[in-house]
Amino acid sequence: MRHYIGVDIGGMSVKCGVVTEKGALVTRSQQKIEEDRSADAVVALTVALVRRCVEESGVSWKDIAGLGVGCPGQASKGVLVAAANFESWKNVELERLLNEALDIPSILVNDADAAVAAEHWIGTAANVRNFVMITLGTGIGFGVVNDNAILAGGTGLIEGGHMIVVPMGRPCGCTQRGCLERYSSATALIEQAKIKAADKSLVTQLSSVDGEITAKHVFDAADAGDVIAKELIAEAADYLGFACVNFCRILDPELIVLSGGLAESGEPFIQAIRDAYNKYTWTKLPNPARIEKASVGYDSGIIGAAAFAFKKDGVEAGNPQHV
């Protein structure tokens, strides 16, 4: 039985898994990206993680038919041209480097496209021909499926997380100001909590136990009734609902799928995004788009990256083709 490796390179960690042709995750591994965020360091970390993951899976290397790697930023023909979360990375030949280090046919894709492929294959959007997927993590990933094919755009730079929602707003790592990512990502939530919570909020009390403030601390504080935490979450949801209206006006999807760590925070947050969408959208014309949580879950980036490897190997796994 053929198996495939899926790798998800995120802003803070690298995740890896061995995946079957049915989309089942045999095993997974994860490692934090340390202070050295250079391409050489992250590639070395990824190679070591893949080797460890395959060994732990019990799957023979001869049964590994391919590797897919999802990474934030502009991916084109095996090269990561640029990535906002890795400022020093320019024209990194990630596909070739992994291929040579592991002797496995490899394919590089945008990380949001990988998550989209997983959801389209075995998740909430399995039978949907037109949908948008928003991945809410340390940044905001974005992918579009139109008529069963993932839109790549002219240069592979469809980045909904960098749509400007506040003109001349908060500065972003992409060099723009006011990007959605600076208002509705986990990173933005944490930054605002540090600014606004201080000693007045339960967020600070909860974080003092573990050290650093996390998005979970903010949501836990909100669940406990903390006013500041509630305001921070409401702001993030409001900007997301606003952005969803704009995505619908441009793309006319049947479904908007929310994935990533913030989407896993619970139904109240998803409903707050729906409420914001309803507040901003038009009322004289139909609003057919549903807003739902992704069902593949935390490892969608791994499974979706593997789906692209399936496709490269000639195996039909969902619809991870590009247009």
Image (spheres, rainbow, N blue to C red):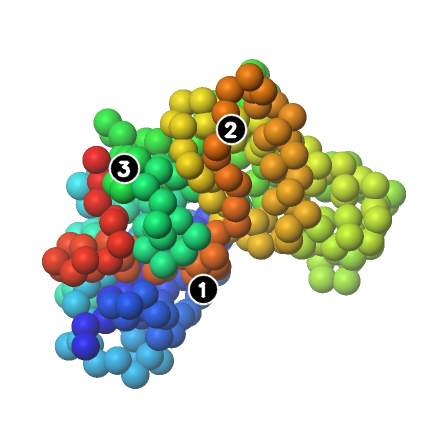
Q: Position of residue 273 (x, y in %)?
A: 61, 37
Q: Position of residue 208 (x, y in %)?
A: 78, 57
Q: Position of residue 268 (x, y in %)?
A: 68, 47
In the image, residue 236 sits, relative to residue 205, either above or below, namely above
Measured Cα–Cα span from mark 3 to mark 2: 19 Å
- Amino acid, disc 1: Gln
- Amino acid, disc 3: Asp
Q: Quadrant of the N terminus?
A: bottom left
In the image, residue 58 sits, relative to residue 171, either above or below, namely below
Q: Nearer the viewer, mark 3 or mark 2?
A: 2
Q: Position of residue 60 (x, y in %)?
A: 21, 81
Q: Residue at x 65, y 26 (%)?
A: 279
Q: Residue at x 53, y 34 (%)?
A: 181
Residue 245 located left or right of residue 94: right
The answer to which quarter of the image holds residue 72 is top left
**Reading the chain from its start, which is encountered first: label 1 or label 3?**
1
Reading the image, the residue beneath label 1 is 31
Measured Cα–Cα span from mark 1 to mark 3: 36 Å
Visible in this render: residue 192?
no
217 or 300: which is nearer to us? 300
Reading the image, the residue beneath label 2 is 287
Reading the image, the residue beneath label 3 is 147
Q: Residue at x 21, y 45 (%)?
A: 321
Q: Secondary structure at mark 1?
A: strand
